[in-house]
Image (cartoon, helix red, strand yellow):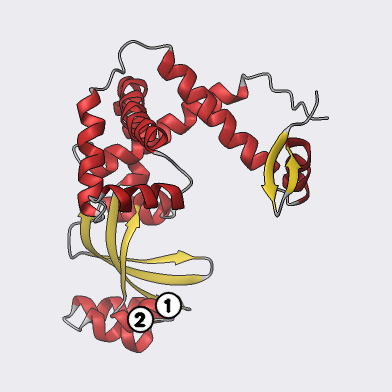
Amino acid sequence: MESSSFLTVNDHQITISQAVKYLQTAGKLGQYIGDILRQYVIEQEIQGREDIEISPTLAEQTIIDFRLKNQLSDPHAFQEWLTNNGSDYPTFHASVTLSFKLEKLKALITEPKLSEHFIERKIFLDRVVLSRILVDNRELAEELQTQIEEGSSFEQLAKEYSLADERVFNGMMGPISRGTLPDIVRAAVDAANLGQLVGPIELEGRYCLFRVEQFLSASLEDPQLQQTLQNELFEQWLAEKIQKLMVKLQVS
């Protein structure tokens, strides 16, 4: 296969073959091929379906809104922006249309699996806000537990005795995924009430006292979370599709 001109730099032509070698040398060829295969699978899927039609007025209105937002209502300013971004109006319009079709494709592919995926991931999506005091011996941990139960300030004791970095924040660790907690901690926290002291619990030779501040239960009604799960499922679908492709690199 004869390589054709791909780029012209200072009147010097760079062939497709040379471009491929440059990418290989830079260690980026695999990434670029991956991007090409990804786009190929997406466009093939969109072209093969009849349930992903987008109203032409939707793309037009989106472009109008984009131009107004970015102060590109003047035709000359918009054309200059397109040129500076290596594009033209038909290409930009096609890109906007494709973005809508892609979102519709994502929804169609992921909707049947979304609830099941949410259930599978829920332990990692649920979060809990904890405060912690970390010390290096059980006797001190038990003494601090007693003091807190008798009315001493958890925050003050955390600042004074804790070995963990969050002692500067009165022991507050912030939101933590339930799925990332050690099993022994997760079981104790799940059984606790808000504000309850948990521990001492031994972890890697040290002893922790936890206070449960807040439970943050994940919900599929959360649009942002729903989008995240859709993206995860879509990427899985894409990876499976790409894995089944027969790909040959042909350059001279």
Q: Hey, which residue is sitting farthest bottom in the picture?
A: 160
| Category of crowding for the residue at label 1, using alpha-carbon neighbours closer than 10 angstroms: few (below 14), some (14–19), many (at least 20) | some
Using the image, determine if residue 246 lies above or below residue 189: above
Q: Is residue 107 left or right of residue 33?
A: left
Q: Position of residue 129 (x, y in %)?
A: 27, 62
The quadrant of the rendering that contains the N terminus is top right
Residues marked 2 and 1 touching at CB (< 8 Å): yes
Give the residue pinned by disc 2.
167
Query: Which residue is painted at 78% across and 49% down in the image?
Result: 25
Q: Which mark is residue 207?
A: none
Q: Position of residue 235 (x, y in %)?
A: 47, 33
Q: Nearer the viewer, residue 19 or 87?
A: 87
Query: Which residue is painted at 32% across and 86% down in the image?
Result: 159
Give the residue pinned by disc 1.
164
The quadrant of the rendering that contains the C terminus is top right
Using the image, determine if residue 50 lies above or below residue 128: above
Using the image, determine if residue 6 lies above or below residue 55: below
